Structure formats: structure tokens, C-alpha cells
């Protein structure tokens, strides 16, 4: 194979790696077990959830025939390993089902705090930031990791 052919293959491989790494999610630095929202924010989220989401997903977040559960093993299995940013984008773009895109980023973040609290993830001292780039740094983990994993160490 000529030097030009080898150079073309190396260049193409490097370009493919660049595209692949650009598509990979941002490195997560926090877990939902790290206390990523406040109790006050969760109160707002519970109220917003009640007004916007409960009629489909239920007050108990168990879902129904048309709406998926937002709590329990089914919810955790669906979202384990993804990020809070992934969940926020799904809610922001597709909910409420009868009026997608109606919720603000702040409302979505507040609703997520209610979902996290209901699923047993602890509150902390800082509000959940509504910016998706920040939310993509928070892993959803179904089971509590040991301390060294939770802190990204």
C-alpha cells in the first residue's frame, strides 16, 4: 500500500474517533446519591409534578397503561447508567404529552427533584441546576455506590 493510502486510512480513523468522542456523553462527575438538589426545590417540584404530571403518571409516580412509571424498579432499570440531563431532555422535549415543550428548564429541573426524592435519592445543599450541560454530569445510579465511586475517585 502506498504512503498516501496509509495516510488516508490514518486520517479517516482519526476523524472517526473524533466524531465518536464528540457523540459520547460528557464525563459525569456526580451521582444522584450525592445530594444534587435541595429539600426546598423538591417542594416546588412536588407541586409542579402534581399540577403537570400526576394526571398521567399518578400521584405515586407508578404510571399507568399510557404513562411510564417514574418510580420503582421499572423506572430505575430504564434510567440506570444514564444522566439526569438525559432525563431532563426527555421531559423537556416530550412532556406533558398533550403540550410538549410547555415546561421551562427550571420547571423540569424542579420536577426531576421530586422524582429523585420519591425514589429515595437524598437532598443536599445546592439546588439542581436546570442547564442540561450541568445535568449531563450527574449519573443516575439505581444502587448506591461506595463513597470512592460516588465522588468520581
Image: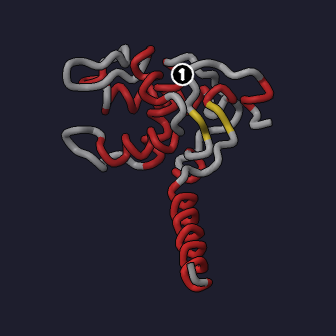
The quadrant of the rendering that contains the C terminus is top right
**Residue 38 appears left or right of 115:** right
Q: Above or below — where is 38 with respect to 27? A: above
Q: Quadrant of residue 123?
A: top right
How crowded pointer 1 is (Cα within 10 Å; few <14, some 14-19, many 20+) is rated as: many
- Between residue 15 and residue 138, name the one nearer to us: 15
Q: Who's the residue at 52% across and 65% down the image?
A: 16
Judged from the image, the secondary structure of the residue bearing numbered disc 1 is helix
Q: Above or below — where is 112 with respect to 120? A: below
Q: Which residue is mark 1?
A: 117
Q: Quadrant of residue 38?
A: top right
**Residue 142 appears left or right of 69:** right
Q: Who's the residue at 37% across and 40% down the image?
A: 91
The quadrant of the rendering that contains the N terminus is bottom right
How far across and down, in percent of the image, does residue 134 sit? Answer: 60, 49
**Residue 127 appears left or right of 59:** right
Q: Who's the residue at 69% across and 22% down the image?
A: 145
- Between residue 40 and residue 59, name the one nearer to us: 59
How far across and down, in percent of the image, does residue 55 sit? Answer: 25, 24
Q: Who's the residue at 52% across and 51% down the image?
A: 132
- Between residue 96 and residue 147, name the one nearer to us: 147
Amino acid at each position: 500500500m502506498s504512503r498516501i493510502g496509509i495516510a488516508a486510512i490514518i486520517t479517516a480513523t482519526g476523524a472517526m474517533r473524533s466524531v465518536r468522542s464528540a457523540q459520547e456523553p460528557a464525563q459525569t462527575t456526580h451521582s444522584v446519591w450525592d445530594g444534587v438538589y435541595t429539600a426546598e426545590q423538591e417542594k416546588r417540584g412536588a407541586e409542579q409534578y402534581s399540577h403537570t404530571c400526576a394526571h398521567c403518571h399518578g400521584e405515586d409516580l407508578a404510571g399507568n397503561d399510557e404513562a411510564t412509571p417514574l418510580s420503582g424498579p421499572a423506572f430505575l432499570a430504564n434510567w440506570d447508567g444514564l444522566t439526569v440531563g438525559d432525563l431532563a431532555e426527555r421531559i423537556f422535549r416530550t412532556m406533558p404529552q398533550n403540550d410538549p415543550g410547555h415546561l421551562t428548564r427550571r420547571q423540569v429541573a424542579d420536577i426531576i427533584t421530586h422524582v429523585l426524592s420519591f425514589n429515595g435519592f437524598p437532598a443536599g445543599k445546592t439546588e439542581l441546576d436546570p442547564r442540561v450541560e450541568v445535568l449531563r454530569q450527574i449519573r443516575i445510579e439505581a444502587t448506591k455506590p461506595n463513597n470512592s465511586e460516588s465522588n468520581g475517585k
